Amino acid sequence: MKKLEQLYEGKAKKVFATEDPNVVIVDYKDDATAFNGIKKGTITGKGVINNRMSNHIMRKLEAEGIPTHLIEELSERETAVKKVTIVPLEVIVRNISAGSFAKRYGVEEGIVFDEPTIEFSYKNDDLGDPLMNAYHAAALKLATWAEINQIKDYAFRINTLLKGFLKSVGIDLVDFKLEFGKIADGQIVLADEISPDTCRLWDETTHEKLDKDRFRRDMGGVEDAYQEVMRRLMGDK
Ligand code: UDP
């Protein structure tokens, strides 16, 4: 598959056109940002890990009946995916309190919820991705009610599956962010990535952070933490 012109460059990935109008190639970078782009840095090797890990997880989700944008891993950093129109919502599922949830509600990190929670943010950098409920999303026509309900259903199913995959390798899934897109026929599919950039992952015994919080909070050992998650999830594959 041939890479044609660059369509877009985001914080962590570039997207290229191909000869097929329904297929694009994503190219994962080592660039890392946090706090809506205010903190910038590099996590060496992150692009390779996120590309491989996200594809691995999406293949497993596909096998469990979740439709995703994944077509084919092309190289260490490049993957062919279905071209989608992104639904401009960040969909966040939480199992344990952390990050902005803990801050917003004035609670400590680490409270294990009886049931997972879901929330949306409006994907809009200029506005700082404001929190938004489903009625707001419907009012702004960011998605139809049928699409919102489909997204919620997929998000909770993905949580159950992902929590299971990670628990089996000694990792607790604290929270994560998903993005969904619409393919040409109108079907909603899981898009973007699932990686230590977009999930909070804690070792189940030591509670050590194995995710981007190490970068956000200048804790060091970021590269090793990403490597460790990949090693546990994918072995030597
Ligand atoms: N997240 C993300 N991209 C964002 C915001 C959040 O991938 O733009 C992920 C983040 O890594 C965490 C989860 O979504 O796993 C919940 O993040 P939270 O709302 O607590 O915000 P944060 O503390 O990251 O600002």
Image (cartoon, grey):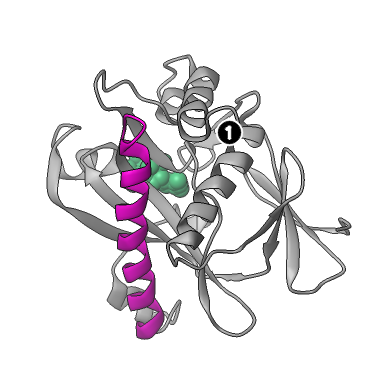
- Note whether 57 is above or below 99 in the view shown: below
Residue nearer the viewer, 164 or 218: 164
**On the image, numbered disc 1 is attached to which residue?**
32
The boundaries of the magenta stretch are 145-171
- Note whether 215 is above or below 117 in the view shown: above
- Note whether 233 is above or below 119 in the view shown: above
Label 1 CB less than 8 angstroms from ligand 1: no
Residue drawn at 66 percent across, 32 percent down? 30
Residue 202 shown left or right of residue 53 in the figure? left
Residue 171 shown left or right of residue 2 in the figure? left
Question: Can residue 236 be found in the magenta stretch?
Answer: no
- Ligand 1's image quarter is top left
Q: Amino acid at mark 1?
A: Ala
Measured from the top left, where is residue 43 in percent x and y?
60, 25
Question: Do we see residue 131 in this rendering?
Answer: no
Q: How many marks?
A: 1
